[in-house]
Image (cartoon, helix red, strand yellow):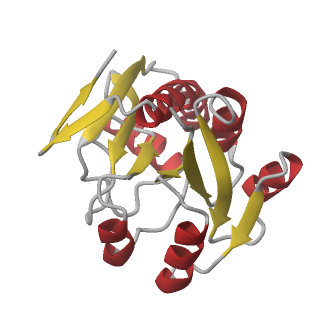
Amino acid sequence: MALKNIAVFVSGGGTNLQTLMDQVHGKYGNIELVLSNNSKAYGLKRAEDHNIVGYYIDSNEDDKIIKILRNKKIDFIVLAGYLKKISSKLVHSYKGKIINIHPSLIPSFCGTSYYGLKVHEKAIEYGVKVSGATVHFVDEGMDTGPIIMQETVAVYPDDSPEDLQKRVLEVEHRILSESVKKMCQNKLILNGRIVTVLE
């Protein structure tokens, strides 16, 4: 089976991108490009260090983004810390072929204004006993697409948001790389809101 061509979108440091480059790239699929809406994103430097082409493009330039993706024959897109809502046009162009990682157990602590450290601040403030991470397909809403994988972490009484973020990030790396591997192997079956993950 030919390796899938993957595009990874980032806005910041790109630690999830690094995990995908280490665990997926060249083995299960090829990361053909990294795209960022932030010209200073360290994720672009990570791509450069791995000889992967990187693009800084304003997130509103849908036609330009879609043209690049098609020219590179991209099979699917991974949002790995991409802090902009994907346009309806892009969602429709790659329907069922965009996945995202979010640092909470969706539908808790997600949607507009829930990103980065704010997610963990709100989880601690609310007093939840567990948090975690979610990989999901992207639809036209904000963090509302069908769930692929979730994993929990404990929340302790003396946790700072940074403590919780660190533990959740370990889970993010694990379930995102596993989800991308399954996507590359055609082992994610989407039926309405239900995602079946094949062995």
Instruction: Residue at 54% x, 30% y: name it.
Output: 177
Question: Looking at the image, which is closer to me, 170 or 17?
Answer: 17
User: Residue 149 appears at what percent x and percent y?
Assistant: 34, 29
Q: Position of residue 154 (x, y in %)?
A: 42, 17
The residue at the point 29 percent across, 69 percent down is 92
x, y (%) of residue 173? Answer: 57, 30
Question: In this rendering, would 85 be left or right of 147?
Answer: right
Is residue 137 found left or right of 42 in the rendered image?
left
Q: Position of residue 93 (x, y in %)?
A: 35, 69
Q: Residue furthest front?
A: 1
96 up-or-down from 184: above or below: below
Question: Taking 143 as reference, is 58 left or right?
Answer: right
Residue ID at (37%, 36%): 134
The quadrant holding residue 182 is top left
Quadrant position of the C terminus in the picture = top left
Compared across the picture, whether 17 is left or right of 134 comes to right
- Looking at the image, the residue that sits furthest to the right is 49
| 76 or 82, nearer to the observer | 76
